[in-house]
Each structure stands twice: as structure tokens, then as C-alpha cells.
Image (cartoon, rainbow, N blue to C red):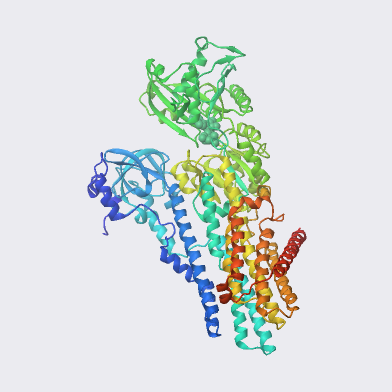
Amino acid sequence: MSEKEFYQYTIDETIKEFDVSQDEGLNDDQVESAREKYGTNELEEQEKMSWWEILWDKINDLIVYLLLFAALLSFLTGEPIEGFAVIIAIILSVLTGFITEYSAQKSVDSLQSMGSTSAKVRRNGQVQEIDSADIVPGDILILGEGAAVAADARLIKTKNLAAIEAALTGESEAVDKDAEEIFEDEEGIGDRLNMVFQGTAITRGTGEAVVTETGMDTEVGKITEMLHDSEKNETPLDIELDKLGKVIIVAAAIAGISVLITGLITGQELTEMFHIAVILAVAAIPEAMPAVETITLSRGMKTMAKHKALVKSLPAVETLGSTSVIASDKTGTLTENQMAVQKIRLADNTEYDVSGTGYTPEGKITKDGEEVNLDEHTELKSMIAYGLWASDAELTKEDNGEYDIIGDPTDGALTVLAEKMDITRDVIKDAGYERIDEIPFDSEAKYMAVHYDGPNEIVVIKGAPDVLFDMTDMSDETHDTWSQYNEELTEHGLRVIALASLEVEGNDKGKSIEEIVENHPNEFTMAGLFGIIDPPREDVKESIELTQNAGIQVKMITGDHPKTASVIAEEIGINNSENTMTGKEIDEAYGQDDFVEKIRETAVFARVSPENKLQIVEALRKEGEVVAMTGDGVNDAPALNGADIGVAMGIRGTEVAKESSDMILTNDRFGTIVDAVREGRIIFENIKKYVSFLFSCNMVEITAIFLATVFLLPLPIMPLHVLFLNLMIDIGPAMAIAFETGEEDIMERGPRDSNQGLLNKQFLGRIIFSGLVIGLASFAFFMFLGQNESLTLEYRQTAVFSFMAIAQLMHIFNVRETSRFGLDRTLFKNKFLVGAIVVSVLLLLVAVYAPFMQTIIGTESLRGITWAYIAGAGVITTFLVYLLNKLIVRLEK
Ligand code: ADP
Ligand code: MG
């Protein structure tokens, strides 16, 4: 037999193996030495690159090879200065690429660690919450409902424990766990009932377990390892940019070959032709591109974090920008989650109003406007007391005098109601009652139950009215009446909770609460209904309006009653809020031809199960929507995983939800999603803008050189000038575009078509035509200067070089805004851009006037009149490009 595995160990063997005390856990020394031996408990998501690997990645690049080849050609054709300049260009480009990527990786790491998960362990005799990464083999994990299992571990204690292991086994049913189970033979992972595994989630019960494996040694770790062996996955954006780079290189190659052919036909010198090929290669290559891309994305990630949205990966930043549907939780995300009972309905259709807001336990109960005395309304009194019995929340008073609750907000509302009437837990105790058992609330079953012992034994259940009505003993007629009451309350947008009770007698005494409920499926007695108000968050209406104006649909998803949900949806301005669908209707429609259609048209999904959530996500994605979906529970994990952007609640969310998501809202606010989408859009726009800028600048150079060769004229611009333009003049402004804060109307356009990448016709058209126009202008300028025979070739080349620099800097204004000319007040919001333009102009002056630069790159001092021509020609050219862009947009429409 192979080596014994931990599921084959007994509890005692496990404890002995790790030399851990069951009551104390590990001590600090043990943790220390285990850490040294096993390292941290982390999965290497994607193999982390060390600094030299990143550096090599930057060197081992087609662009670098092309440039090296160009340098070689320069040396061979007797142009050593040029050769050295190209080498400097290579070094600069590799270094900027390396530095930005390295620092971006650092900041991604630190952001990811902010979003890291925590786990409860016992160490030094105390239960403490630690970062999951700090767990070591031998640690004792403390497990409870909603916990994410942070490492593989052998259970040593279980009570009612169940886990969902879908992540490992694909099995979506929860598995019952049992520490006492012993295995002699080999078992599959799904059958190792005495173990829990990293990446799975506890759905109910409690337990303790000794950690047996961490990090890459866990079962999930092994799977991750296998994934690593397959291809490193590139982001869609990377692929797009690669494609674009290739297009440009092909364009340059075509230009080079045509030059070569023209040269040969017209009998020009071969070395001269090679020389030109070098320039074309240098001109075509976007040396600054990789650096700018990394800067943009990592800056976006940081900005989002500032807005309280932790995004876990760089590609997610960009996907966010194309979100077309946001499916949001109601309770807590769209509403305050500060609940208060506002109305109470009893069996005889008496309705009571409760005053007071929030959790402050001050308020009165009135009936038809008159304050009621509880002692004269005994049924009301016992209804309120039962509410407290079945509540799992505690009211606390903070130092600043404000009240808050610990526990479920719905339960909090009932606790506060009781406190308003001076009914406290002490009162229950004094009356001789004590809770002996309970069925906790479960959003699938939508009710909870408690079992009290005292002068008599009572089970109280509370939950969604439609569920409870079926568990109570009533005639059809009474059923209709209650349904009617329920409807009336939901029409006010109230969250309705029903309450019913059952006296435990005879045989049932001593039985578990589950058995009692099962034995009396419909014999409970209805006590009444609570109408609870959960006001929408203040800023939600505004955010929703913003979202819908941005062409993004908002859908509400809730476990609440459809009417309540619809009323609130309308209140906060969700479009088509009257189109509701319940979980039951989803189940019925699922698999039908018109299912997808129905989901699309529906704005409010009520009484949904977690499975429904996944069905909704999948249907929408099938239609090509990019879906952001929020969730907080264990059961939301599949839907969060399935959505394009899974959004977990940072405060309310379970660890599992956070792990399954792409983004965590550290403030649980809907508005934060909107901020993140906005930021994502800005980033995509900025990427488009600097790509457009860099490539059209390259086109300028290619065009001018190509024309000169075809017309058998001297070169209007020398290779070193091209390098100076690409590496000194253009790079600063291009990087600064990453800091553009977005155009005003960025949230007034529809979401971008997710199938349409960067390379659409309009975008390419703009790049090519802008480049052609400025390139033609440069050539024309060169010809124009040639009419004055007193000017040397060097002078003319210096002038063309300066013209290109100025025209390219002016071209920024044609790039930074899509619908307007970009020279306006908003320019000054981007201090980097203003600074970069100033620096570029200064660099240009240095290149033209500094004696050492004149010797190196062969420039001559320009006279004032030439600058006047340059400025004039620059303005005219920029205006022409502007008109042309307008025309392209018009033609597209
Ligand atoms: P959501 O969070 O979307 O409002 P839930 O799953 O929390 O949905 O609640 C669904 C329904 O279950 C509610 O409409 C309510 O009737 C009932 N319910 C919610 N919380 C409790 C609770 N603590 N005790 C009893 N019933 C509850
Ligand atoms: Mg809830």
C-alpha cells in the first residue's frame, strides 16, 4: 500500500503527527518552525515572475530583435553614431518596460493582499482571526457557517457540519462531514468525509480541524499546478495590442520593400536603401507602448481601490468598462439594511402602526392614531414577544449614544420593536423561558424556527409569509385573507415577516426541533405579520440614473416578495420595475425557447434561489451581455464565478463570496460598482487614445520617408531624428494620457460592444488618415523649404524634424477628446499632460540648439522665421486632421 494519507489517520494520530494540543493549538515557536519548513499558505495564481524573468521577457521581444538588426545595419553601413543611438533606444525601451512592469506587479501584489481572506484558528490557547496566508500545517481551524476553508485539514470535531465542495468535485450538493469517520481503503476526494479542503465552503454547522497541507500542496494547489503547465494566458487587451503592433510592422515592411524595389529599379545604391529600411523599422516600432499599457492598468486599479472597489486582476479592470448589465442584491446594497418594523397585522385584521426610525428603541404603537396600551392587547403583546424569541440580534448602545445591532438586520428590527415596548431578553428569562434548540435562517427555505422550554414548550417559526402560510393550520378562506393582508403590506414596499407558533405536547417532548417541524407540517398557528421598512440608500437613486444613462441595465435580485421588491425598484428608479419574475417562474421557464428573452426583459427577480442567480447570469451572457453580479453568501459563489465580473460585498460578504469574485466592494455600496465601471471605461478610452497617438505618430514618419524615396529625393528626416521623436518627444505625452480623467460624457454613452476590440475600422481609419495627413504635410514642408536654395539639407531636415515634433504634440488635442478639440479647460485637469508637453518642447529646443546635440544628431540652429512657418503649418495641419476625423465619424454613421 502506498503511504498512508491523512484521511486514513485517526484523530489521535493526526494530533500526534503535528504535535499540536487540541485545546491550545500551536504555540508561536511551532508556527515559526512550520512556516520555515512549509512556507506561506498561498496558491501561485500565475507563476510570479522574478525581476530577472521580467527583464528577460522585455529583452526577448520581437521589437528588440528588429531594433538590434537595425543597429547592426547601421554599423555595417558606416553609421556608428546611429548604431549607438539605436542601442540606447533599445536599452531605454527595455528599461522603461521593465521598471513599469516591475512596479505594477508590486502594486498589484499589495492590492491583492488587501483583498486577502482571513481564517479563524486556535493558537496559544486562543481563537484568533488571521490572514489565510499565515496558516501552517498543524494549525487548528475553527469552522462555522459561511467560512471558507483555508487549507486542507483533518477534522477533529464536528457538529452538524456540511461543506460545498463544488470547486473540487463539481458536486453542487453540500456534503455532510464527520470527524469520527475512519477510512482504511483509498477514497476519492469527495468521499473523504473526515477532511475539509481548501477552496471549499462550510454551509452549516461547526467544527474544528487540524491543517494537514497548505499552499501548493493542497488538492486545489495540485490542480493549480496542472493549470500552470498549460499556456500562460494572455489578456484580451494584450492580444489586441499584439495584433495592432503586427499590423504596423507589416505596414512598415511593405513600405520598406516598396522603397527597396523603387530604389533598385531607379538604380540607387544598395547601402542607401538598407539605411532607409533601418529608418522605417525604427519609425514603425512603438517603443513606448508596453510601458504605457502597464501604467494605465495599474493606475486604474489604484484609483478603483481609492473608490472602495478592490479589483483582483488587471484584465478585470478593463472588463469592467464594458459592463452592460448590473444585477444587484436588494437588501444592503440598494437599501440601507437598517430595518424597522412599521406595521403589525394580527389575525382579526387589526393593523397597528409603529413609530420611530432606525435602531433607536424609542417609539409608540398606535391603532387608528391612538396610542395602545399593551396590557389591553395581549395578542399584540405576545406577537411582539415571540418576535424577540425568534430573533438572533442584540441591540447595543455605542459610546456616541447611537444604537446598533449585532446580528441579522431583520432580527434587529424585531428586537428593537420589543425594546420599544420594554420587552427584553431578561423579561423572557424571568418568565421562566429558555431557548433549547433552533433551526437557523436559511435563504433557500426562507424561514427559521426556535424551540423554547419553560412553563410550557413552544416552537416559534418566523419567515416569508408565503412559506409560513403553508405550514399553518387554516382554511382556504383564512388563507386568502392572510394573503390579502400580505399583499397590502408589500404594496407599501414593506418587507413582510410572518410569525407562527406551535405548542409542543405529548410525544413531541424531547424531540429535536427538526423532527417537531417535520411531524406537524401544517399545524402551526398564525400569530401575525410584521411589515418592516428597509429604506433605499440615499445615493442609490442617483447612481441608478447614472448607470441607466450609461446604457447599462440594472436588475434587482432578491429573496424578498416580488411586490415589495417591485415597489422599492420603482422608488429607486429602476427601469421597467413592474416586470418581475419569481424564482418559481424562472424554474418553470428554464430550458424553454423564450427563457433568455424573458430574463432580458425582467428588471426584478424576487424569491430567487442561488441557482436562479446563476441561470440569470448565464442567460444574459448568452445574449452577449457583459454581466456584473453582486452577492454575499456561500450559495452565491457559483453565480459570482459565472459572471463576467463577480462583485462581493466586503462587509457583509462571506469569505467564499469574496474568493469567488473579481471585485470586492469594501463599503457594500451600489454606487461603488458604478464608480468602478466608470473608471474601467476611462481606462479603455485612455488606452485607445495613446495607442492612437503613438501609432499615428509612427505613420507620420513612415509616410514622409516613403514619399521621399519614391520621388528620389534626399531624406526629409534622419534616423536619429526619428529615434529622438519616438523616445524623447512622444513618450511623455503618451504616458500622460493614462492620467486623463475621462470625458464628461463618458457615462452618457452606451457600453462598448464587447466583441469589438481596438481594431475596428473607425479607429484604424483615424490612425491611418491622421498619420497620412501629418506625414504629407511634413513632406510638403520639406519641399517648400527646398525652394530656398540657400538652405542646407541639414537645415531643412532640422526644420522638418521640428515640424513633426510640434505637429505631433498638437495632435494630442485631436486625440484626447473624441467629440471635441482637446484644447480646453479640461486639459489643465491633467497636470501630467501639460507638464509632458512643456518638457517635450524643451527637449526639442535642446535637440535643435544645444551644440553637443547638433554634433550627435546633425541638427542646425533654426531661425525665427522658420519657427513661424512651423507653427503656422502645425496649426493648419492639426485643423485638417480635426476636420478629417469629423468626416470619418460622420461617414461611419
Ligand atoms: P434578501 O436578502 O434578498 O432580502 P433573504 O434571502 O434574506 O433575501 O430573505 C428572503 C425572505 O426570507 C424575506 O423576504 C423574508 O420574508 C424572509 N427572511 C429574511 N430574513 C429573515 C430572518 N432573519 N428570519 C426570518 N425570515 C427572514
Ligand atoms: Mg438577506
In the figure, 257 relative to 847: above or below?
A: below
Quarter of the rendering containing residue 47: bottom left
Q: Position of residue 194 (x, y in %)?
A: 32, 46
In the figure, 482 relative to 8: above or below?
A: above
Horizontal relation, residue 568 to residue 416: left or right: right
* Residue 151 showing in the rendered view: no
Quarter of the C terminus within the rendering: bottom right
* Residue 466 showing in the rendered view: yes
In the figure, 604 relative to 95: above or below?
A: above
Q: Position of residue 319 (x, y in %)?
A: 57, 54
Horizontal relation, residue 186 to residue 556: left or right: left
Q: In this view of the protein, which residue sits in the foreground, 7 or 798?
A: 798
Q: Position of residue 197 (x, y in %)?
A: 37, 49
Q: In this view of the protein, which residue sits in the foreground, 174 or 855?
A: 855
Q: In this view of the protein, which residue sits in the foreground, 870 or 732?
A: 870
Q: In this view of the protein, which residue sits in the foreground, 308 or 219?
A: 308
Q: Position of residue 559 (x, y in %)?
A: 55, 36
Determine the residue located farthest toward the top in the rendered image: 376
Quarter of the N terminus within the rendering: bottom left
Horizontal relation, residue 9 to residue 342: left or right: left
In the figure, 301 relative to 786: above or below?
A: above
Horizontal relation, residue 428 to residue 246: left or right: left
**What residue is rendered at 47% in x and 54% in y?**
108
For the image shown, how many numbered marks are present on the structure?
0
